[in-house]
Each structure stands twice: as structure tokens, then as C-alpha cells.
Image (cartoon, rainbow, N blue to C red):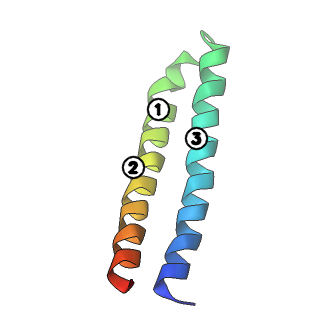
Amino acid sequence: MSDIDALKDEVKKLNARATQKKMDLHDLSEELPQNWQTILQVAQETYDAYKTLTEKRAELKALETASA
């Protein structure tokens, strides 16, 4: 498996994780005021997931551009 293929797989997994975190945050918002104490934790996890996804997408794009 090439570096590009491996990175594509990683991006796919990170995308699924980020989407799940987004849904967790959405679900939490619908349940408010219950569990309001977890807002910062869930928001931070969502932020971290999307930050990592964005970084890996940029890395993949750079790798694809370099090999083209």
C-alpha cells in the first residue's frame, strides 16, 4: 500500500470520527439543559477531531500534488 493510499484510509477514518463527534455535539445540544457540564469536553473533542482531519487532508493534498 502506498503512502497516499494509507493516508486516504486514515482520512476516511478521521472523517468518520469527526462526523460522530459532530453528532455527539448536536445530540448534546438537543438535550440541554441536561448534561450541560459536558459541553466543554464534547466541544473540545469535536474541535480536536476536525483539526486533525483538516491537517491530514492538507497532508494528503500535498502528497498527491507532489506525486502528480
Mark 2 falls on what kind of element? Answer: helix
Q: Earlier in the sequence, mark 2 or mark 1?
A: 1
Q: Position of residue 43 (x, y in %)?
A: 47, 32
| Residue under pointer 3 | 21
How far apart are the two marked residues, 2 and 3, measured between alpha carbons?
12 Å
Q: Residue furthest front?
A: 68
Question: In the picture shown, does residue 1 fall above or below 61?
Answer: below
Q: Is residue 22 above or below residue 2?
A: above
Q: Label 2 neighbourhood size at 10 Å, few (<14), some (14-19), many (20+)?
A: few
Which is nearer the N-term, disc 2 or disc 3?
A: 3
Looking at the picture, tell me which residue is in the foreground, 67 or 35.
67
Quadrant of image for the C terminus: bottom left
Task: Determine crowd level at label 3: few under 14, some 14-19, many 20+ residues with C-alpha closer than 10 A.
Answer: many
The amino acid type, in three-letter code, at marker 1 is Ala
Residue marked by disc 1: 43
- Label 3 element class: helix
In this rendering, would 33 be left or right of 67? right
What kind of residue is marked 3? Answer: Lys
Tell me the kind of residue under disc 2.
Lys
Compare residues 55 and 30 and report the one nearer the observer: 55
Residue drawn at 58 percent across, 41 percent down? 21
Residue occupied by mark 2: 51
